[in-house]
Image (cartoon, rainbow, N blue to C red):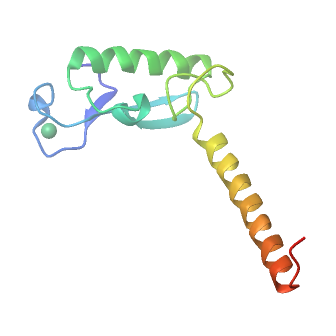
Amino acid sequence: MIPELFKQCDCPRARWPKCDHPFHFRKQVQGRRWKVSLDAWLGHHDVRSVGEAEAVAADMLAAMRSGTFSPLGPRPRQDPDGPYDIHAEITQIKTLVQEALRDVRAIRQRMDNGGTS
Ligand SMILES: [Zn+2]
């Protein structure tokens, strides 16, 4: 198993390839220290084989070295066709909520004024 991979469970290291706990990846690249859960990074929860974990780790490492690594997932955030972007989603939701609140206030104001227009 490559040294960048580790687990946070209480099992002895020798058991890691077999035990049912999630893999994590830890590496310092160009002065940045990364620590990422493989499952969270991929967005699912089934990386349990060493082979698969090492393949994912290799992808992470390549992205880190090329400067395109995002802790949010395998594909860079600026990809327009791509992946789910949690920050964009949050901004969008905030905007929607603000608009909805504005509407509610406007309706209340109209009701308070006793008008129906
Ligand atoms: Zn374990």
Q: Looking at the picture, tell me which residue is in the foreground, 107 or 92.
A: 107
Image quarter in which the C terminus is found = bottom right
Q: In terms of image quadrants, where is residue 55?
A: top left
**26 sits left or right of 102 in the view:** left
Q: Is residue 6 above or below residue 94?
A: above
Q: Residue at x 11, y 32 (%)?
A: 19
Q: Residue furthest front?
A: 116
Q: Is residue 85 left or right of residue 108?
A: left
User: Which residue is painted at 11% across and 41% down in the image?
Assistant: 11
Tell which of 80 and 115 is nearer to you. 115
Q: Residue at x 38, y 21 (%)?
A: 57
Indicate whether 16 appears above or below 94: above
The number of discs equals: 0
- Is residue 7 depicted above or below 83 in this figure? below
Q: Quadrant of ligand 1?
A: top left
Query: Is 14 positioned to the left or the right of 71 in the image?
Result: left
Q: Please provide percent x and percent y for residue 1.
A: 23, 19
Q: Residue at x 14, y 25 (%)?
A: 17
